[in-house]
Image (cartoon, rainbow, N blue to C red):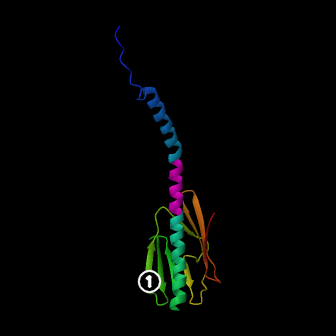
Amino acid sequence: MGQQPEIDSRGFTLLELIITLLVVAVAVGLVAPTIGRSTEGMRARAEVAGFSATLRHAREQAITTRQAHTVVFNPGSRLLTVTTGEDEVRWTRALSARVTVEAMTPDALTVRFQPQGTSSGGEFRLSSANVSYRVSVDAVTGRVRNYRE
């Protein structure tokens, strides 16, 4: 009798490949929305950090240059503008269209930092998607804080 040829069993069956692809598809389907939400949260945190950094930098500049600095938020143009006591524009920072900024006090769109470190104070709410942060400027110390609501 003749010998039967050997069967090569090193490959995968079609059923094994289909099951593997199905498991990978389900895993990607579960993870993708979570990644999307976390990137939106990271973008919101980055905007809040930039907003707070602008306020802190204006305070530092007021102290080191011994010259009052004013930070004005313009909701229409979405710009933070920092000016000196002589109304000289020092720098501006554009905010993302994804973030909404709401002044919690009527005159909070303008925060003035004095050379002694004090400020006019103010409170803002920055929101993006489902994430909301509060940024506050203490009137007595000029300290800028932010925290998630």
Residue 23 shows up from this direction: yes
Q: Amino acid at mark 1?
A: Arg
Q: In front: 88, or 106?
A: 88
Q: Residue at x 46, y 90 (%)?
A: 86
Q: Residue at x 48, y 31 (%)?
A: 19
Q: Is residue 139 left or right of residue 52?
A: right
Q: Report the magenta residues as a range.
A: 33-44
Quadrant containing the N terminus in the rendered view: top left
Q: In front: 39, or 71?
A: 39
Is 37 magenta? The answer is yes
Give the vertical position of 70 relative to 132 (above or below). below
Give the vertical position of 114 relative to 123 (above or below). below
Residue 68 shows up from this direction: no
Give the vertical position of 90 relative to 19 (above or below). below
Helix, strand or loop: magenta stretch = helix
Q: Residue at x 35, y 13 (%)?
A: 3
Residue furthest to the top in view is: 1
- The image quarter containing residue 143 is bottom right
Measured as percent of width and height from the top left, residue 74 is found at 48, 74
Pointer 1 residue? 90
Measured as percent of width and height from the top left, residue 57 is found at 52, 80
Is 92 magenta? The answer is no
Residue furthest to the left in view is: 2
Q: Is residue 11 left or right of residue 130?
A: left
Q: Is residue 27 left or right of residue 148?
A: left
Q: Residue at x 44, y 77 (%)?
A: 92
- The image quarter containing residue 17 is top left
User: Label 1 neighbourhood size at 10 Å, few (<14), some (14-19), many (20+)?
Assistant: few
Count of marks overlaid on the render: 1
Measured as percent of width and height from the top left, residue 125 is found at 58, 67
